[in-house]
Image (cartoon, coloured by chain):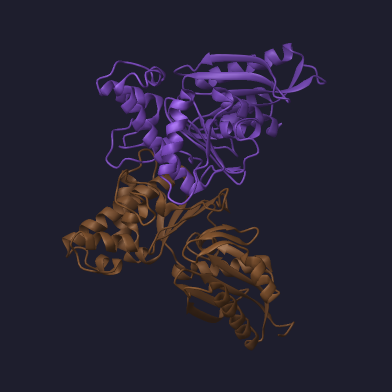
Chain colours: A purple, B brown
Amino acid sequence: MTASGRPVVLAVDLGGTAMKGAVVGDDRTVLAEIARPTPQTEIVGALRALLRDLRTSAHANGARVVAAGVVTPGMLDEARGIVHYASNLGWRDLPLRDILHDDLALPVAVGHDVRAAGLAERTVGAARAMQDFVLVPIGTGVAAALVSAGDTITGATGAAGEFGHIPVVPGGEQCTCGQRGCLEVYVSGAGVARRYRNAGGAELSTQEIAGRLGRDPLADRIWSEAVDVLAQGLDILTLLLDPNVIVLGGGFSEAGDGLFVPLAERMRAGLAWREPPQVVRSSLGSDAGRIGAGLLAFAAA
Amino acid sequence: MTASGRPVVLAVDLGGTAMKGAVVGDDRTVLAEIARPTPQTEIVGALRALLRDLRTSAHANGARVVAAGVVTPGMLDEARGIVHYASNLGWRDLPLRDILHDDLALPVAVGHDVRAAGLAERTVGAARAMQDFVLVPIGTGVAAALVSAGDTITGATGAAGEFGHIPVVPGGEQCTCGQRGCLEVYVSGAGVARRYRNAGGAELSTQEIAGRLGRDPLADRIWSEAVDVLAQGLDILTLLLDPNVIVLGGGFSEAGDGLFVPLAERMRAGLAWREPPQVVRSSLGSDAGRIGAGLLAFAAA
């Protein structure tokens, strides 16, 4: 380690399936990247090993590591760095910041993956300099980062932003969460693929289904229903939070005009006296969480 | 006017049907009250007259008027004191603060009625010292004040909190706003009375309908549907904003156990992995807006 080296941080987006880590400079250039599958057990050990390996890469680049940032799904106390509950990591009340700080002897920031992605979109992405915006990543599931007057809404217990589970269709189809009619039953990657299959379609990914639009009536119907429910959900967000812009991320947003054109139309049709906000595609894509982890790390350094 | 008199403010809650004004001391005691019907036209003139009469009352009490606060419905720019749009006052882009300041030669605060009521509930009411809470006044219509980390969410255009018009029943019954399936179609005072009548019931107020619960099957059904939709809406707020407490205000909240007991049950049934927040009745009732106007006035003094 050279005390005079370039200051960098270790940034990790820890998800249920992958751990995506990078060594990031203060101009946000990426000096090194390491991605590994998230193991089924001993996730903390794997995360510690990933961070140590990132630090070794940083030193090999002659850089000076000033902090680390890790973002995770679940319910978090970001101020104290505690993950209260993360179902797909199997964690409960884990003092992640203290554990990593003991290991690395560095300032460590722990954040929520989607809220950190929102911070990244706001700082360097599609919502740059926006004070009131919403980021909705639509992947296997759906979540949201809600930003009001420049502050991310975290809620009383760190559980704000559960947009995928808002009940939008009373008595609707069963969700994996145990409830019925949740938004992500209809709109998510998993939901669209399952509904297509259950309606007699082949075993296709949401991307493949989106690729059949205009040629496959079943794909058209399932997709149209997804757009209807997404428009309803985004109208709810608009009426409650009045954002400048809504940023859509995740695989779903890659459908382009097949999504954004009907979505804008139906959002407008569902609002009585106001215009819908602009709806744009994320410019950071699946890197947003990791970029947010880097921003949190520099803020903690 | 005695320069050494007790400091007071003029506080007015200007609604579509009534103007409720008071002279309020810094310990929040009310020295004088004047309530008048809101006229159909010349509302600004009537408001100015009301404020001048309140000032006269203040001086008659030997008090020193340090500021005025006026709260209104609609879309507002609170920082600049402009009412962009208030349909039931017939106002568009009205520079209310400047108009009143010219008239009174006093600091004037202009606020949103429901958000000011939320400030009052948080400062002296049922959400005292809560950092994350929601106030939902249910009267003729429905709105919400959303407070996150101690800050009221106003939105990019001052239009946040339109809880009454979130679309909760896709393709549902017609709302006065022109859309279908809005929450307030089912839950508001006007909505419950209209649905009871349209289902063959008598011309009764919502309060009268609530008074027939357990004895009138039609009242039971309409009320139960209102509670279902309210539970759905409050679950949406809970999942998005994660409040500590939800405060219900307005005439609807006076139904007591007939509302709060089934509501808590159905909110819990609609949430998969988390407890619902506490739901309590407003302790300030219909004075909350006017009390909020007084708080805003003292803050501007």
Check the picture and name the quadrant holding the N terminus of chain B. bottom right
Q: Is residue B249 above or below residue A206?
A: below
Q: Looking at the image, which residue is at 47% across and 73% down?
A: B40
| Residue B98 visible in the current orientation | yes
- Asked if residue B153 lies left or right of residue B208, the reply is right
Q: Residue furthest right?
A: A4
Q: Position of residue A241 (x, y in %)?
A: 51, 47
Of the pair B202 and B224, the residue shown nearer to us:
B202
Residue at 33% from the left image edge and 57% from the top image edge: B187
Find residue A167 and report its horizontal and vertical position in percent.
35, 41
Q: Residue placed at 36% from the left, 63% from the top? A: B253
Q: Position of residue A132 (x, y in %)?
A: 58, 43
The quadrant of the image that shows the C terminus of chain B is: bottom right
Residue B180 is situated, as x and y percent measured from the top left of the image, at 34, 49
Q: Residue furthest top?
A: A60
User: Residue B298: in sight, yes or no?
Assistant: no
- Pick the residue in front: B1 or B259: B1
Q: How many marks?
A: 0
In the rendered image of this protein, does residue A88 appear above or below residue B105?
A: above
- Tell me if residue B280 comes above or below residue A278 in the rendering: below
Query: Residue B292 lies in what quarter of the image?
Result: bottom right
Front residue of this view, candidates A14 and A28: A28
